[in-house]
Amino acid sequence: MDYPPPPPPNPPRPPKSGSNLWIIVVVAGVVVLAVFTAVAVGGVMFLRHAQAKREAVVSLQKSVAEEREKIAQSIKDRNFAQGDASVGHIKDTLDASTSQLSGVDAAATRAMSKFLGKFQERLHEYGAAAEQLKQQKVLSWDVRERATIETDRQIVHDFMDSNARLKDMLEHSEGLLSAALDAEKVPPQTRNATVAGYAKSQVLLFPLLMRVRQGDQTIGENALAALDLLEVNWGKWTRDESTGHLRFENTVVRDAFNDHIRKINAAGADQRKAQEEMLAHSKPAAGQ
């Protein structure tokens, strides 16, 4: 497509390529999910605590409270590894608790541990895709050769696919929990009460989780569109190595590219807001 000749030189207002969007992606998309799992465990596993051994309940309750604090700190520190480790620690506590429990309580605890394990698998998959996005500097638009654009495009597709699978698991989490309880032969009455407790704990959190997942989708879609513009207009833009800013010969292309970056930044900002709201909702009630 032929564009009209560009007007006299007019310095564009390029995106800030060093804005560390990968941190937004990792923290909002992964660590906040860890908060969700911690809250789910804290809200669900105490439904039957009156019939369980007190020491097992106290240990589990203490672990959930401690890991919730660590997860909150990991968000402040932008430390995905700590958030992921906290999910693992809660799962380990659940596994250890089964030796102190019996009957339905032990079965329900095993089921919750397996349920949490499935989420952790998705977390690892998502985390690896987000890390690849970071390592390859895809969102910094540091494209040196035209051939690497296809590689960057595939990295974005992989990230979007992992985000979609995580979103699907969240949307079907009640059914997955119910199936895990059935697999451990938990009686229907206990299963239904546990799933109901889980659902209640997610009333405020689920919409926020979906905002985070939609944010990743928006980031991915606009990253792909921006890469397409760079490829189609190869040779008609340059990168200022001192600032990382891109400069386009054609203002129409420049504005289109910057619009995609604005949408990426807006999605990241909304993820941060959702994350803050989620942390506020996840704070334990007095006496918990």
Image: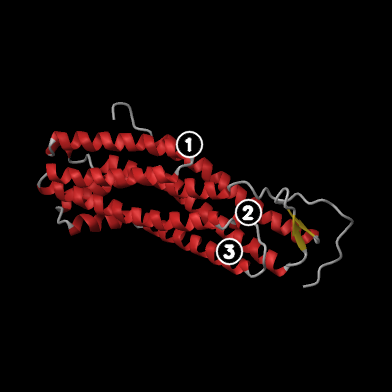
> In x, y percent, where is residue 10?
85, 52
Residue found at x 61% / y 48%: 265
Question: From where the camera sits, is residue 171 visible?
Answer: no
Locate residue 235: give its quadrant.
bottom right
Label 2, label 1: how many angstroms apart (C-alpha)?
23 Å
For the residues labelled 1 and 3, the Cα–Cα distance comes to 29 Å
Q: Please indicate whether residue 173 sits to the left or right of residue 267 in the image.
A: left
The residue labelled by disc 3 is 152
- The kind of secondary structure element at disc 2 is helix
Residue furthest bottom as drawn = 1
The residue that disc 2 covers is: 140
Decide which of tag 1 and tag 3 comes sooner along the chain.
1
Q: Earlier in the sequence, mark 2 or mark 1?
A: 1
Q: Which residue is mark 1?
A: 76
Dot placed on the residue nearer the N-terminal end, 2 or 3: 2
Residue type at tag 1: Lys
The local crowd at label 2, few if under 14, some if 14 to 19, many if 20 or more residues have their Cα within 10 Å, is some
Asked whether residue 262 appears in the rendered view, the answer is: yes
Q: Residue furthest left?
A: 103
Dot 2 amino acid type: Ser
- Position of 201 with respect to 141 (left or right) is left
Which of the pair 155/161 is nearer the observer? Answer: 155
Gap between marks 2 and 3, in whole Å?
11 Å
